[in-house]
Image (spheres, rainbow, N blue to C red):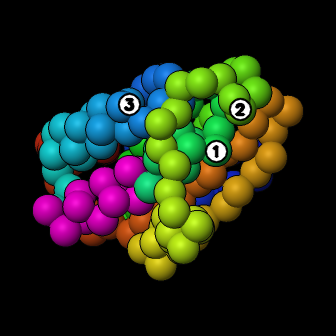
Amino acid sequence: MCGNASYDHPGIEATLALPAEAPYVRMARHFGTALLDQWGLTLDERDTAIAVLGELAANAAEHGRSKMAIALALSEFSLRISVVDFGREPGHGGSAVRRAADESGRGMEIVRVLSDRMSVERQTDGYCIEAVLPCGRVSASASGLP
């Protein structure tokens, strides 16, 4: 989803567009959980991925524009999670997510620690943050991969 990343070619992908507002972060996590279960990731892989997805979606809800798009792409040995914020400028009035000053920045540090690779790309109408996580070879029947 981000233009500057050169990662494994995805075998299967899914995207979801949502308002960049705090109540939709939970919806993003539920979407990811159901999808990753369907794709056959282990519980540990899924839980790590959902922690990353939740932090990226919360970041978009707190700092981003009015909308966010979430993309999950599974290749043979990795899972790429991308969150893009776009739409109207911040101050759209939607986000009720505000963290204490001592908590600011913790989410991105969590993403960095849990990911093999992470990138942040400034786009014309927002940001794309992408994290790549390792995952074991999933079964072809569960994932849809050849």
The verdict on residue 8 being magenta is no
User: Callout 1, which amino acid?
Assistant: His
Q: Is residue 87 above or below residue 65?
A: above
- Residue 120 marker: none
SS class, disc 1: helix
Q: Which residue is mark 2?
A: 90
Name which quarter of the figure residue 39 lies in.
top left
Are the two marked residues, 3 and 1, in contact with CB atoms closer than 8 angstroms? no
Which of marks 2 and 3 precedes in the sequence? 3
Query: At 39% across and 69% down in the image, what residue appears?
Result: 134
Seen from the viewer's position, the closer of residues 63 and 145 is: 63
Q: Which residue is mark 1?
A: 63
Are the two marked residues, 3 and 2, in contact with CB atoms closer than 8 angstroms? no
Residue furthest bottom as drawn: 113
Q: Is residue 78 left or right of residue 84?
A: left
Q: Which residue is mark 3?
A: 24
The verdict on residue 45 being magenta is yes
Q: Which residues are magenta?
A: 43-54
SS class, disc 2: loop
Q: Is residue 141 above or below residue 105?
A: above
Which of marks 2 and 1 precedes in the sequence? 1
Seen from the viewer's position, the closer of residues 41 and 81 is: 81
